[in-house]
Amino acid sequence: MLTVVGLGLGLARPPVSVAAPTYDLNLGLRYDDNLTRAEAAADQEHDTAVTAGSRVSGRRRLGLLDSLSWELGLNATWWTRLEDLSELAGDAGLRYRRSFSTAFDSPWLEAAVIATGLKHRDSSLRDGGLVRAGLTAGRRLGARTDARLGYAYVVRRAVEDDVFDIEQHEAFGQIDLTLGPRWLAYVGVTAREGELVSSAGIPNPRILAAANEVSREPDSAVGSGRSPLGIGRSPRRTYQIDGLVLDGEAGLNVLLGRGLALDLAAGYVQAYAAGDNQYNGCRVNLNLLWQFR
């Protein structure tokens, strides 16, 4: 760590320190039982993916209570059935954090902006990018518990099709509980309000009536659904609908060694969209995490 102390006009300026960059690598598996975010069982597609990612981040302490951090990341997801949905995502972000005292359990407030570029294997209507800006507040609730609450505004823009031009408001909270020297459990809840997407082969008339946008061409990346006559299959399209998503997740993180951890998490999603359209889904993530300087 490099520390710089300056003097000016006979008064000491607050210490400014720059921490060495931190590097994070992850390799994992993901399962999703409703990747199409569909209401009808015939349109729900399950799939398993291999995930990999890398991230470098750094922090500059501006004073005793303030810090500014940056991050750059690259993540890849390879779906095994719906291969065209496989995704490469690169992101860059800035975070400013303010603590309210020097105590270990002091409340803190963080403002963050993260921009992400998205490129899919063969689903050009999903290619584009998003920006996420938000505020998070947190504090330690004793020696073993850490809690935080926050809000974020998310804007996604697609290169080719307006169906993925999405804006959402998010409210979220998470509690971390240290179970022992190597064990950490966590529970989180997120509510998202705004524009959602859902894919269907034979759309329910309620979906068509409530949709803001419909993909201009059949969405070949999500396969085909049941045909109108019940014989064979018909191409699916993707629909944009206003709605609310409730997303809960619980996980367990186990420290395996110096900078090496295994993380297992399970989540459940319930969506309520315009026109009385609903969908739900489950997911499981298993990740091997490695952090070093």
Image (cartoon, helix red, strand yellow):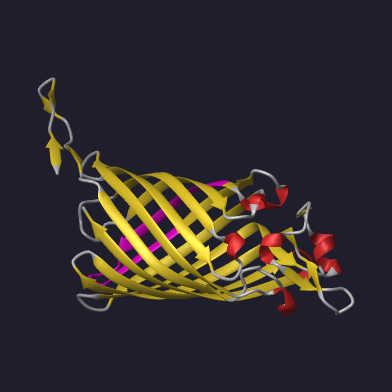
Which one is in front, 75 or 2? 75
Q: Quadrant of the N terminus?
A: top left
Which one is in front, 86 or 212? 86
Which one is in front, 265 or 234? 234
Q: Residue at x 72, y 65 (%)?
A: 199
Is residue 272 shown left or right of residue 259? right
Q: Is residue 235 magenta?
A: no
Asked which quadrant contains residue 181, the reply is bottom left
Instruction: Tell me: residue 282, above or below residue 153.
Output: below
Tell me the magenta residue range. Answer: 129-149
Q: Residue at x 36, y 51 (%)?
A: 109
Looking at the magenta stretch, what is its main secondary structure?
strand
Residue 251, percent from left and from top: 40, 75
Is residue 209 shown left or right of residue 148? right
Asked which quadrant contains residue 139, the reply is bottom left
Is residue 280 shown left or right of residue 291? right
Instruction: Tell me: residue 133, above or below residue 31.
Output: above
Instruction: Tell me: residue 147, above or below residue 195.
Output: below
Residue 236, percent from left and from top: 76, 65
Residue 258, percent from left and from top: 18, 66
Q: Residue at x 53, y 57 (%)?
A: 87
Instruction: Tell me: residue 277, above or below residue 208.
Output: below
Residue 155, percent from left and from top: 59, 47
